Amino acid sequence: MSSSNNHGIVINEHGDASVLSYTELPMPEAAADQIVVRNAAAGLNFIDTYHRSGLYKVPLPYTLGREGAGEVVAVGVDAAAAGWAVGDKAAYVLTPGAYAQYTAVATSRAAKLPAGVTEEQGAAVMLQGLTAHYLAHSSYKVKAGETVLVHAAAGGTGLLLAQMCKNAGATVIGTVSTDAKAELATSVGKVDHVIKYSEDSVVDAIDRITAGVGVDVVFDGVGAATFDASMTVLKPRGTMVSFGNASGAVPPVNILASLKGSKYLTRPSLGDFISGPGEFDSRLADLFAWIAAGDLTVTVGATFPLESAADAHRALESRGTTGKILLVPGG
Ligand code: NDP
């Protein structure tokens, strides 16, 4: 493709949301195994704030974003041989540069959107949906009759994860910071018990809810602020899945003290759970089938113009969002 109108959100240095800059970018070309997507929407994920702040290092300058969806406008030779064509509707994940009007995407990270799944749903479900899927099915396989704790249950990942745990037959306890989030976690997330951890002690609440037994598994994307309580509320031989750092990175762990009770601790990453043969496709097939059947509700909490990505980052980091946040490119 020749140069034409492409803009995106670039960082030239690490820092707070003010380092995000709406910048003219070269029009991407499709390498042999790539497609170029004109983004209808890009997904906002907490990891984007880590890339921006420098908690996770990226080469600078860097175009932010890891997922999006839209129409295919260019196709590499290998991608064409694999069945991709201009005009296809695609969603993709773990691809740098999604905060842009156009993004080049390896076909190994892209999927065609089936009928019944919109571009917005596609952009909204790739990263957080695949994450919720592997957390509840592979990091730890949630089973009927178990009790699980999902932190930040009204957030993008938490809301999907709570539904999947509930659909697996578990009793789901969710933490949230506000009454509005409690209402969403209950209505859409289908959590059985909600804890307002901004006011109540998680340890006391779980003790009460489980009559002192504790939970089988904790899914903790909040990190530093909740780690100790999460370890405390686990049953003996329970599993702590520490998958994020929304409140800050978890400090080094004293395994003798923290894992007392023969507890398990894992710190998973999405990339490791979609790279095995067929894994990406089979997890996505589940997600799209559940959405189409009405078994998984994708909740877009807010949509921001791409140019206002800094406002979206500020909202996410100040705990002011629910569900999925989308960024929509103009023109
Ligand atoms: P969310 O939409 O869940 O937003 C984060 C939520 O965390 C907030 O809404 C807030 O909910 C809660 N929170 C608690 N303390 C804080 C704090 N100090 N600052 C900000 N938020 C806080 O974000 P995502 O779904 O994008 O990500 C959730 C977590 O999952 C992140 O830690 C992310 O890094 C992780 N993640 C990990 C992946 C992996 O494979 N390891 C993949 C995808 C996400 P409340 O107000 O209710 O407390």
Image (spheres, rainbow, N blue to C red):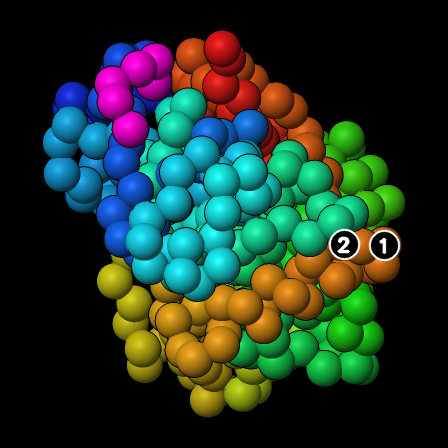
CB of mark 2 within 8 Å of CB of mark 1? yes
Residue 146: name its quadrant.
Answer: bottom right
Image coordinates of residue 226 in percent, x first then y, are 49, 53
Q: Which residue is tagged 2?
A: 291
Q: Is residue 212 left or right of residue 246?
A: right
Q: Is residue 118 magenta?
A: no
Residue 243 shows in the view: no
What residue do we see at 77% from left, 31% from top? 180
Image coordinates of residue 23 in percent, x first then y, are 27, 13
The answer as to whether callout 1 falls within 8 Å of ligand 1 is no
What residue do we see at 18% from left, 43% from top? 57
Q: Amino acid at mark 1?
A: Gly
Question: Start and end of the magenta stretch?
Answer: 1-6
Mark 1: secondary structure: loop
Classify mark 2: residues with Cα within 10 Å, few (<14), some (14-19) or many (20+).
Answer: some
| Above or below 246: residue 278 | below
How far apart, in angstroms, are the residues tagged by discs 2 and 1? 5 Å
